[in-house]
Image: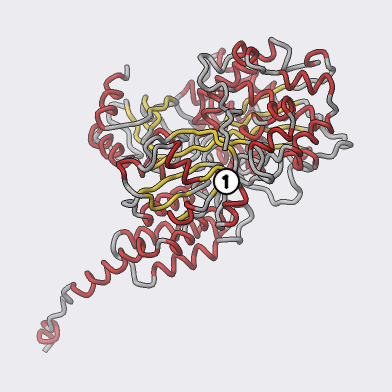
């Protein structure tokens, strides 16, 4: 498979974040093309043809999402770029915004043109404050060149972009929670439907896409949807950024075509498992994605279909690699800490369940687990799954029960060890009390 | 309690949003930047600017972890404990920081210089183990590198 750099094409250029470099390398040509000669419908059609699917986690068709926005609505429409990247393992949007903020801005403008929005927001997690500043500077550069603001390039189309900081809540990466947060409220997810395309920010039609998704749009408009789709697979078009972390020799953010073999990525692109050790497991799409065994990795390709077939998901494209010495129970414990901390507290199964899972795991890891605790943990996770109104509960469950199914020994060894120590413990009952009583 | 300059900055932020309340998080950040934390008095003032009640603002501040209701150290060290950092030795970094600073996560040094926090993923997974000091990222940490970083802080 040919490795074409679409999203990362500018990453290695000096000052890649400046508008000068962006313009020198084809920047804002897609916007010119769209504004000069394409109808909004034609832009949506091109994006549909590209088979671009959301890079934030859910993997929904971007063109479809845009087409759901009612064109005849009298309400204002909004575009939101979701840059609330917070899922453990995921750090690719950070690189994208640092190295090529104008690609995100141009993608936002194309989305806004497609759905007739005149105000767009970039919601960036607060911890990425330096990126908020960088993206704001890029917007001002774009404004000075006539790409942002009123009457863009004399086309009559106007759009402004506002960067909005999150404040340390993973749940705000969920699209409806993000809108609540942007409205100045607690980040509690809304019940869907209605979907944001119809009832979104301020009750108005809203397109919300991950920043990488939006950055993929300019090359699609410039080179055509068919070109982009052919870079990947039939149903997962294009290339995408994969954030690789954990026990590989060269962790980092890699751009690879959809459909690329996971094994090859680990061995060739990332230099294999560090220290010459063997692969034990991979979490393939951020901490929410069910874990894969080394055998499953052999047959896995980096596209939405392959991961679904393995009952996992490509999610945010974060690949967490673990070597043979990794204790999966400890890894799962870390992830339960995360979900307990990030549960917004709205749904009981998630709020109470994540805490209970964490406490149960602590008991197991302390060696105080009862023999049935592993089954209890499994059942608990199964019972959280599907019972919460946003996917955080499902994510917390997915981090746990598939890991028990596939790596049960890693959990049971603690329980077995504790069973031995319990039976070897002196009883402390001497019978003295009875004799004293006599 | 806030400087004129900060108040003007806040008015400019509010003016950018189609709905006033949307300015709440950015305004709170600006106030916290000046005061270092968010005392009751500041929340009352923010509520007045945005036509909200004190409770409206309080309930937001308590939901988001980046807001502080009490003063914290000049340097807020946030060491990541989540999965990618854990796999790459993040626990040893936290332990080293605890030893060096003589405090546990959630505590501040008596001189008010450092506050240590254990945080969930900060988005530095491919360059683990990592931490943030205030808003600056530090990657590929080792105990030696942590010592250098601490010594370099003004």
Name the foreground residue: A102 vs B103: A102
Residue that mark 1 sits on: A315
Residue A202 seen in this snapshot = no
Residue, x 43% and y 37% (percent of image)?
Answer: A270
Q: Nearer the viewer, residue B82 or B73?
A: B82
For the point 53% across and 65% down, the residue is A382
Q: Residue furthest front?
A: A1
Pinpoint residue B123: horizontal percent, then vertical percent.
Answer: 47, 35
Q: Where residue A211 sits: x, y (%)?
A: 62, 32
Which residue occupies 23% across, 36% down?
B99
Q: How is the image coloured?
A: secondary structure
Please, which chain is the residue tagged with disc 1 on? Answer: A
- Is residue A326 rendered to the left or right of residue A227? left
Q: Quadrant of residue B60?
A: top right
> A182 or A46: which is nearer to us?
A46
**Up-down: is A43 above or below A282?**
above
Spot occupied by residue B125 in the image (x, y as percentages of width and height):
43, 37
Residue A9 visible somewhere in the drawing: yes
Q: Nearer the viewer, residue A339 or A85?
A: A85
């Amino acid at each position: 498979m040919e490795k074409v750099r679409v999203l990362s094409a500018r990453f290695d250029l000096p000052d890649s974040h400046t508008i000068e470099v962006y313009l020198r390398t084809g920047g804002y040509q897609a916007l010119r093309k769209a504004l000069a000669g394409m109808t909004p419908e034609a832009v949506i059609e091109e994006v549909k043809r590209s088979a671009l699917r959301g890079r934030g986690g859910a993997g929904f068709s971007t063109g479809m999402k845009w087409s759901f926005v009612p064109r005849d609505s009298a309400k204002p429409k909004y575009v939101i770029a979701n840059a609330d990247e917070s899922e453990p393992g995921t750090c690719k949007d950070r690189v994208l915004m640092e190295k090529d903020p104008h690609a995100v801005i141009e993608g936002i403008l194309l989305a806004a043109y497609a759905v007739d929005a005149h105000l767009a927001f970039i919601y960036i997690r607060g911890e990425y404050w330096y990126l908020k500043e960088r993206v704001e500077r890029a917007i001002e550069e774009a404004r000075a060149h006539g790409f942002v603001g009123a009457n863009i390039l004399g086309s009559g189309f106007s759009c402004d972009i506002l960067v909005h900081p999150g404040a340390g809540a993973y749940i705000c990466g969920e699209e409806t929670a993000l809108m609540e947060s942007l409205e100045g409220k607690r980040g509690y997810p809304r019940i869907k439907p209605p979907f944001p395309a119809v009832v979104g920010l301020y009750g108005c039609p809203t397109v919300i896409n991950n920043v990488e998704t939006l950055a993929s749009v300019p090359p699609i408009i410039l080179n055509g949807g068919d070109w982009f789709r052919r870079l990947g697979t039939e149903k997962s078009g294009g290339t995408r950024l994969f954030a690789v972390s954990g026990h590989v020799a060269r962790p980092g953010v890699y751009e690879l075509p959809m459909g690329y073999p996971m094994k090859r990525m680990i061995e060739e692109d990332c230099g294999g498992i560090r220290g010459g050790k063997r692969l034990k497991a991979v979490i393939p799409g951020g901490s929410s994605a069910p874990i894969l065994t080394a055998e499953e990795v052999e047959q896995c390709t980096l596209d939405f279909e392959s991961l679904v077939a393995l009952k996992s998901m490509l999610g945010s494209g974060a690949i967490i690699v673990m070597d043979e010495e990794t204790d999966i129970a400890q890894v799962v414990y870390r992830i339960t800490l995360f979900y307990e901390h990030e549960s917004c507290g709205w749904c009981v199964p998630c709020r109470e369940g994540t805490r209970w899972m964490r406490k149960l795991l602590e008991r197991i890891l302390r060696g105080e687990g009862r023999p049935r605790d592993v089954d209890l943990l499994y059942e608990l996770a199964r019972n959280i799954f599907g019972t919460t109104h946003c996917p955080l509960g499902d994510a917390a469950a997915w981090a746990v029960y598939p890991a028990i199914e596939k790596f049960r020994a890693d959990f049971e060894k603690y329980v077995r060890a504790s069973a031995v120590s319990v039976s070897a413990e002196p009883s402390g009952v001497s019978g003295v009390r009875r004799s004293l009583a006599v | 309690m806030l400087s004129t300059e900060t108040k003007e900055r806040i008015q400019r932020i509010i003016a950018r949003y189609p709905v006033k309340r949307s300015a709440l998080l950015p305004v709170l950040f600006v106030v916290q930047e000046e005061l270092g934390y968010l005392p009751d008095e500041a929340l009352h003032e923010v509520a007045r600017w945005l036509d909200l009640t004190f409770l409206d603002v309080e309930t937001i501040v308590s939901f988001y972890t980046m807001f502080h209701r009490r003063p914290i150290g000049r340097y807020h060290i946030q060491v990541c404990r989540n999965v990618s950092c854990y796999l790459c030795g993040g626990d040893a970094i936290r332990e080293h920081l605890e030893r060096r600073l003589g405090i546990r996560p959630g505590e501040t040094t008596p001189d008010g210089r450092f506050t240590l926090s254990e945080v969930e993923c900060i988005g530095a997974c491919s360059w683990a183990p990592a931490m943030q000091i205030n808003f600056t990222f530090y990657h590929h940490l080792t105990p030696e590198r942590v010592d250098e970083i601490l010594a370099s802080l003004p």
